[in-house]
Image: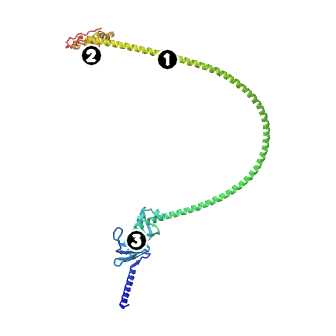
């Protein structure tokens, strides 16, 4: 091997070793308590936008020189003292809530990305101040929505609300809430202290009540023990006395049973005698009863036979009489109906015959008038004129006037005196023939005369008053 080749191999080996050393120095491993943030040219997001940083927790990554750089975020928990004062509650009471929060950078992929974008390069003090501002705001917001009683007594509810709201806001900068510890709650008006004193007084009263109840239960128990003792002693004495009385009762019952047996034997003997006598009487009574029953049955049968037969005969007689009477009524009604029908039929035939004859007479009158119906009516009216005049005269014939006294001054109208006007008025009370015809819807024939024109009233000289009787 020539010296030149050896030199080349040595140089190549040194260069290769240097490249390996350099590559090893660019391969970075991420510790478990840190987050490795690679920034620079780290690729693109799923939506095509440029990626600002690439976060790794618990792994290793090769860092390209010139194009990429790397920094670390510490996962060590950060303790933040938050002494909130004068926070306004829902009851408008200001309270102090000293508390301590423990936060840390989250290892969730999305929240790690928020931490890389907002916390990378900040010092611990700056992260604490940023977190404290967020916690202060959320604490005041939560306290403003709760009563002091809820905050003071239901700490779990208060801490749950604080954790939920604070952690939601901390995630926006890449942090997560690890622990919340509220040391004490106080207010400037002493309301919480008063609640504490009230609770203490209630606890003391409950304790005193419990002691009194225990004392009472002890006294009651002692009294119950004495009562049980006295009851049991009295019960034992009563049992002894009852035993003695039972013995006396047994003796009395034995004597009573003896007397009862003797009386029962006597009663059985007397009863047997009376039973035999009663049986003898019963048998005699039964025989007499049977004879009476037989006689009564015979008489009842005879009576029923006579009555029933007589009733049947009378019933049949009445039925036959009713049937006969009904038949007579039917025949009489049929005869009357036939008679009425014959009478009505005869009257109808007579009426028909009369109307027929009248029609024939009217036809003859019309023919006699030359077929002129008006002339025929005039002929009929002329024929009845005498009767009409008679009826008109009869209207005033029966008027009885005992006395009429007229005082006439002679100064009547139309040249007539009052007396003349009175008599004329009486005559006008009778309907004239012309008005009579007009009321009947007819016109008086011309041959009976035309209505005279009223003449002008003549002047007359007044006459002396006269009397008419």
Tell me whether circle 2 and circle 3 mark residues in contact (CB < 8 Å). Answer: no
Residue where numbered disc 1 is placed: 330
Tell me the tag on residue 51: none
Tell me the tag on residue 112: 3
Residue depicted at 56% across the width and 63% down the height: 207
Q: Nearer the viewer, residue 270 or 57?
A: 57
Q: Earlier in the sequence, mark 2 or mark 3?
A: 3
Residue 290 coordinates in the image, percent (x, y) = 72, 27
Residue 310 coordinates in the image, percent (x, y) = 62, 19
Tell me whether circle 3 and circle 1 mark residues in contact (CB < 8 Å). Answer: no
**In this image, 234 relative to 37: left or right?**
right
Q: Does residue 424 appear anywhere in the picture?
A: no
Residue where numbered disc 2 is placed: 442
Residue depicted at 62% across the width and 59% down the height: 217
Residue 213 coordinates in the image, percent (x, y) = 59, 60
Q: Earlier in the sequence, mark 3 or mark 1?
A: 3
Q: Nearer the viewer, residue 359 or 185?
A: 359
Q: Residue furthest bottom?
A: 3
Category of crowding for the residue at label 2, using alpha-carbon neighbours closer than 10 angstroms: few (below 14), some (14–19), many (at least 20)? some
Q: To which quarter of the image does residue 297 belong?
A: top right
From this view, report whether residue 91 is shown above or below residue 36: above
Q: Nearer the viewer, residue 307 or 246?
A: 307
Residue depicted at 65% across the width and 59% down the height: 222
Query: Where's the N terminus, which quadrant?
Result: bottom left
Residue depicted at 40% across the width and 64% down the height: 141
Q: To which quarter of the image does residue 279 belong?
A: top right
Q: Secondary structure at mark 2?
A: loop
Query: How far separated are the C-alphas under marks 2 and 3?
Result: 133 Å
Query: How far separated are the C-alphas under marks 2 and 1?
Result: 55 Å
Query: Where's the C terminus, which quadrant?
Result: top left
Category of crowding for the residue at label 1, using alpha-carbon neighbours closer than 10 angstroms: few (below 14), some (14–19), many (at least 20)? few
Tell me the mark number nearer the camera, choosing from 2 and 1: 1
């Amino acid at each position: 091997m020539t010296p030149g080749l050896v030199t080349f191999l040595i140089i190549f080996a040194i260069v290769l070793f240097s490249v390996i050393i350099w590559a090893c120095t660019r391969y970075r491993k991420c510790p478990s308590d840190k987050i490795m943030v690679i920034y620079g040219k780290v690729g693109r997001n799923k939506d095509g936008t440029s990626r600002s940083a690439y976060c790794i927790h618990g792994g290793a990554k090769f860092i390209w020189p010139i194009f990429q750089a790397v920094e670390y975020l510490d996962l060590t928990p950060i303790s933040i003292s938050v002494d909130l004062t004068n926070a306004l509650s829902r009851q408008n009471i200001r309270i102090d809530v000293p508390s301590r929060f423990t936060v840390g950078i989250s290892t969730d992929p999305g929240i790690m990305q928020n931490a890389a974008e907002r916390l990378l390069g900040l010092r611990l003090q700056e992260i604490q101040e940023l977190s404290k501002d967020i916690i202060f705001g959320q604490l005041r917001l939560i306290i403003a929505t709760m009563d002091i009683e809820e905050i003071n007594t239901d700490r779990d509810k208060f801490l749950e609300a604080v954790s939920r709201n604070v952690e939601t806001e901390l995630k926006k900068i890449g942090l997560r809430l690890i622990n919340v510890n509220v040391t004490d709650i106080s207010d400037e008006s002493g309301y919480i202290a008063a609640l504490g004193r009230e609770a203490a007084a209630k606890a003391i009263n409950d304790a005193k009540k419990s002691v009194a109840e225990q004392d009472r239960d002890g006294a009651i128990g002692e009294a119950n023990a004495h009562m049980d003792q006295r009851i049991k002693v009295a019960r034992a004495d009563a049992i002894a006395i009852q035993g003695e009385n039972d013995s006396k009762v047994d003796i009395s019952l034995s004597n009573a049973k003896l007397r009862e047996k003797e009386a029962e034997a006597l009663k059985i003997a007397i009863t047997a005698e009376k039973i035999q006598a009663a049986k003898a009487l019963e048998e005699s009574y039964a025989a007499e009863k049977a004879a009476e029953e037989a006689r009564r049955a015979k008489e009842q049968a005879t009576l029923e036979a006579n009555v029933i037969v007589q009733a049947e005969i009378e019933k049949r007689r009445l039925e036959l009489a009713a049937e006969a009477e009904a038949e007579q009524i039917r025949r009489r009604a049929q005869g009357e109906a036939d008679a009425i029908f014959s009478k009505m039929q005869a009257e109808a035939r007579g009426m028909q015959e009369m109307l027929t004859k009248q029609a024939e007479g009217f036809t003859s009158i019309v023919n006699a008038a030359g077929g002129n119906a008006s002339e025929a009516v005039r002929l009929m009216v002329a024929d009845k004129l005498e009767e009409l005049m008679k009826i008109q005269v009869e209207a005033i014939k029966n008027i009885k006037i005992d006395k009429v006294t007229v005082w006439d001054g002679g100064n009547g109208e139309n040249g007539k005196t009052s007396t003349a006007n009175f008599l004329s008025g009486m005559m006008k009370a009778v309907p004239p023939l012309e008005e009579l015809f007009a009321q009947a819807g007819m016109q008086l024939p011309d041959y009976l005369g035309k209505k005279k024109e009223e003449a002008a009233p003549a002047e007359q000289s007044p006459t002396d008053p006269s009397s008419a009787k």
